[in-house]
């Protein structure tokens, strides 16, 4: 039995239509949930009340933190800047390895202790000196209306917006959603449909469609993240196929982050990813022609360093999320050969640092 939807949770949702049999279908993501009265979708936060669909988490957050932009991870989007991060609850995927499972798999709204309007979030971000706001922790696809309204409010104040997402979204809402985003880090969780189906209850092709749309048809800055899980998606063959696809279909300048898995949620019996596996994956990606490949969740200065695409001189040297050296010009050019580095940059005066600071938004 689905948890009843109270009147306080009933924000009008978009992206649905009525079916001939009386049910209504959610058109936001490829799950196409079909709902009778009182039912919720797989994401848990979109449900049916009467003859309409509602979003139950509009204006409600699981918490706010100021992070370094590199934590998203985004290494080519205003490096060293700070970003105000928040999420809600629920998710439209069912990843057995979810590392934010207490939020994304929540079936109770006790996690949503913070309430904030889009305008309040934008104002706080500006007052805190954040370059951008991130919709993260759980997938912003499922709270699209809240994220889109917040993005509008942010842009009114000159604050950028970032989506951290699995990219599992239908074409029409995808176009409207990303029209309001300045950057995105998209999880490319594996490169087989079998993995997606068995480990996330989703499919690969819609994610690839999202990536091609973002990189080829929008101005959104895109970086990719793949969490390497030992024995599941870390074979040299699969990594090679994925990197070749990225190079051919998205371009060699798209940054790719390989991050280390640690045992969590329903995969506590799987060992953590060895650092050597991340290094191997990075080498495979470079061999496929990718220019900007990083490692994450491990201490690896080499794997955190941004190199010039032309002369391969180090331009940004990172130690975890801390920038140790920054050699780019104000316009984002290599001082050695003048090649412009893919991404978005501005004058580098100081960095936020590696700290993560919880904040109260009022």
Image (cartoon, rainbow, N blue to C red):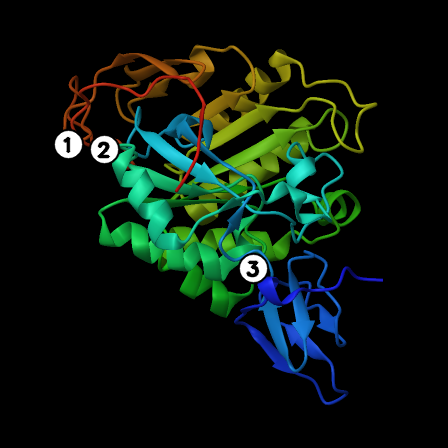
User: At 41% from the left edge and 39% from the top edge, which residue is drawn?
Assistant: 361
Quick check: 124 left or right of 284?
Answer: left
Q: Which residue is mark 1?
A: 331
User: At 66% from the left edge and 44% from the top edge, which residue is drawn?
Assistant: 110
Asked if disc 2 and disc 1 are in contact, CB closer than 8 Å, the reply is yes
**Which quadrant of the structure image shows residue 50?**
bottom right
Quick check: 173 left or right of 38?
Answer: left
Q: Which residue is mark 3?
A: 169
Tell me the quadrant of the picture where the C terminus can be found: top left
Q: How many marks?
A: 3
Q: Which residue is mark 2?
A: 345
Asked if disc 1 and disc 3 are in contact, CB closer than 8 Å, the reply is no
Q: Earlier along the polypeptide chain: callout 2 or callout 3?
A: 3
User: At 55% from the left edge and 25% from the top edge, which residue is drawn?
Assistant: 284
- Res. 289 visible in picture: no
10 Å crowding of disc 1: few (<14), some (14-19), many (20+): few
Camera-side residue: 193 or 324?
Answer: 324
Q: Earlier along the polypeptide chain: callout 2 or callout 1?
A: 1
Whether 176 is drawn above or below 68: the answer is below
Looking at the picture, how far across and down is residue 141, in whole percent?
Answer: 54, 55
Camera-side residue: 274 or 49?
Answer: 49
């Amino acid at each position: 039995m689905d948890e009843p939807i109270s009147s306080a949770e009933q924000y009008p949702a978009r992206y649905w239509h009525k079916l001939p049999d009386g049910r209504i279908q959610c058109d936001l993501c490829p799950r196409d949930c079909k709902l009778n009265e009182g039912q919720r979708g797989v994401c848990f936060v979109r449900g049916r009340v009467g003859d309409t669909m509602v979003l139950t988490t509009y204006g409600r957050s699981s918490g706010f933190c100021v992070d370094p932009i590199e934590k998203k991870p985004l290494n080519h989007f205003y490096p060293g800047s700070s970003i105000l991060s928040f999420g809600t609850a629920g998710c439209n995927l069912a990843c057995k390895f979810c590392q934010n499972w207490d939020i994304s798999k929540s079936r109770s709204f006790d996690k949503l202790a913070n309430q904030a309007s889009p305008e309040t979030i934008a104002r706080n971000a500006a007052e805190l000196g954040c370059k951008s706001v991130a919709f993260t922790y759980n997938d912003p696809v499922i709270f699209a209306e809240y994220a889109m309204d917040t993005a509008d409010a942010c842009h009114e104040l000159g604050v950028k917006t970032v989506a951290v997402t699995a990219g599992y979204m239908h074409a029409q809402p995808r176009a409207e959603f990303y029209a309001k985003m300045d950057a995105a880090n998209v999880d490319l969780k594996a490169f087989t449909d079998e993995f997606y189906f068995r480990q996330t209850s989703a499919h690969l092709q819609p994610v690839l469609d999202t990536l091609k749309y973002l990189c080829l048809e929008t101005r959104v800055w895109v970086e990719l993240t793949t969490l390497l899980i030992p024995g599941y998606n870390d074979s040299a063959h699969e990594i090679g196929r994925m990197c070749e696809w990225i190079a051919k279909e998205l371009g060699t300048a798209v940054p790719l982050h390989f991050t280390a898995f640690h045992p969590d949620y329903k995969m506590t019996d799987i060992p953590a990813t060895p650092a050597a596996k991340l290094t191997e994956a990075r080498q495979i990606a470079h061999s496929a022609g990718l220019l900007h490949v990083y490692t994450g969740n491990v201490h690896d200065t080499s794997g955190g360093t941004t190199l010039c695409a032309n002369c391969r001189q180090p331009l940004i040297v990172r130690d975890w999320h801390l920038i140790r050296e920054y050699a780019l010009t104000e316009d984002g050019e290599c001082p050695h050969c003048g090649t412009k580095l893919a991404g978005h940059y501005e004058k580098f005066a100081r960095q936020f640092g590696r700290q993560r600071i919880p904040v109260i938004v009022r």
